[in-house]
Amino acid sequence: MRLFQREILRRWMSHILMAACLLCGLLTACASNTAPVAGPLPGQQIWKAGVSSFLFGTNDTQEWADDNVETNPQVQQALKAAHFTLMRTFFIDKSPIDGHATTDAELEQRVKAVEKSDMTCLGVLYNIMDVAFAKHVVAYLGSRCNLYEFGNEPDYGDGIGHGPYSIQTYLQQWNTVIPQLRKINPQAKFIGPVTYTYTGNDCTYDPDGYAHCYMQDFLAGVRASGVLPDAISFHWYPCYNDTKASCLAQAPTYGQAVTQVKAWVQSILGKNLPVGITEWNYDPSNPPPDYGADFIRQFTTQALQAMIQAKLDFACQFDAQSYANYGVLDMFALGQPKPQYYAIKDIISQYLP
C-alpha cells in the first residue's frame, strides 16, 4: 500500500515538474520574443516586430545658434526620456561660420551631447579631403564613436567648398582613406556614399534609357576595389514647396527608396548590407506656411511606418535643435519639444521592448 502511494506521489510530482518545465519554456520563449537582441551595427538592437532601434535617430548638424542640442540639457534629457537611439553628429575640420580649426574641446562637446542623451554616436567625417583631421577624429574618439559616414552629400556639395565631388574622386578618397581609418579603430564601421537622394547625382544613361547614378556607381566601384562599406546611406526629402496633401502623399516613398537601394546592394555586391536614411524630413527648404502640427504628425508617422515596412536599418530625422534652415526643421525650439518629437516618441513606445 505504501509502495503504491509512493508511486502515485512520484508520478504526481513528475507531472508537476513537467508542467513547470513547460511553463518555464513558454516564459523563456516569450522573453526572447520581447527582449532586444544585438543588431549588425555597434549599439543597434532589434526591438518588437523586428524593428531596428536605430530607426529613431536625429541629427546634430553645424550649430547656427548658441542654444542648441549640445548646450541645452533639456533637449538631451527629452531625447533620453523618449528613448531616441542614434545621434548623427557633424565633425567638420573648420567652422563654416568663421573658419577656425575645430578643437578637441569642440569634438568633446559634440560627443558628450550624444552621451548625455544616452544615444549612440554616428559621426560624419565631413571633409573627405582632410585626411589628417579624419584620422585625428577617429583616434581621439576611440570607442566613444564606432559609426562613421564618409562625407555628407558629396554628390551635391554644400556651397562652401566641400564638393560636389565626382564619383571617381569620391571613390579614390574612399579607397585610400577608409583602410587607414579601419587600422586606427578596427571596431568602427564606415558608411557611404551619403548621397543627397537615394539615386544621387551624376547620372549616365545606357542606350535603353536606364540610368546609372552615384549610388550604383559607388557600389560598382567598391566591388571592384574590394574596400566594401559596412553600411549604405542616403538622404531623402520627398517634398519641395508642395501642398500639404501633395507632400503627405509622398510619405510612402521612403519605403520605395529603401527597397530600391537594397535591391541595388544585393544585385551589385551580391550580398546584403545595412541601409540607412541619415537625413529625412518632409521638405529640405522652407515649407509652405500652412504646414501645421497635424500635418507634421501625420507625415512623420506615415514616413516611419514606411521605413519599418521596408525593414530599414537606421534613420536620423533632420534635425534636433541646431537652428538649421532657420529652425524650421528643428525638433525642439529653445529646449521645448515640437510636434515631430511627440510623433516619433509615440512610435518608439510601440516598439520599445
Image: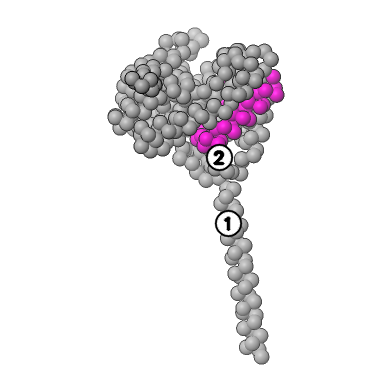
* Residue 106 placement (x, y as % from top left): 50, 20
| Label 2 packing within 10 angstroms: few (<14), some (14-19), many (20+) | many
Which residue type does callout 2 highlight? Val
Q: Kindly tell me whether residue 151 is visible in this rendering.
A: yes
Q: Nearer the viewer, residue 97 or 305?
A: 305
Helix, strand or loop under label 2: loop
Among the two numbered marks 2 and 1 on one chain, the one whose residue lies closer to the N terminus: 1
Quarter assignment of residue 245: top right
In the image, is 4 to the left or to the right of 92? right
Q: Residue at x 61, y 41 (%)?
A: 352
Image quadrant in which you'd find residue 347:
top right
Residue 155 pos. (x, y %): 41, 17
Q: Which SS class for mark 1? A: helix
Residue 298 magenta-highlighted? yes
Report if residue 105 lies within the magenta region.
Answer: no
Question: In this figure, which colouring scheme has been used for the structure?
Answer: one colour
In the image, the segment drawn in magenta is: 292-321
Q: Report the disc number at residue 51.
A: 2
Q: Which mark is residue 28?
A: 1
Question: Mark 1: few, some, or many residues within 10 Å (few <14, many ≥20)?
Answer: few
Amino acid carrying mark 1 in the image: Thr
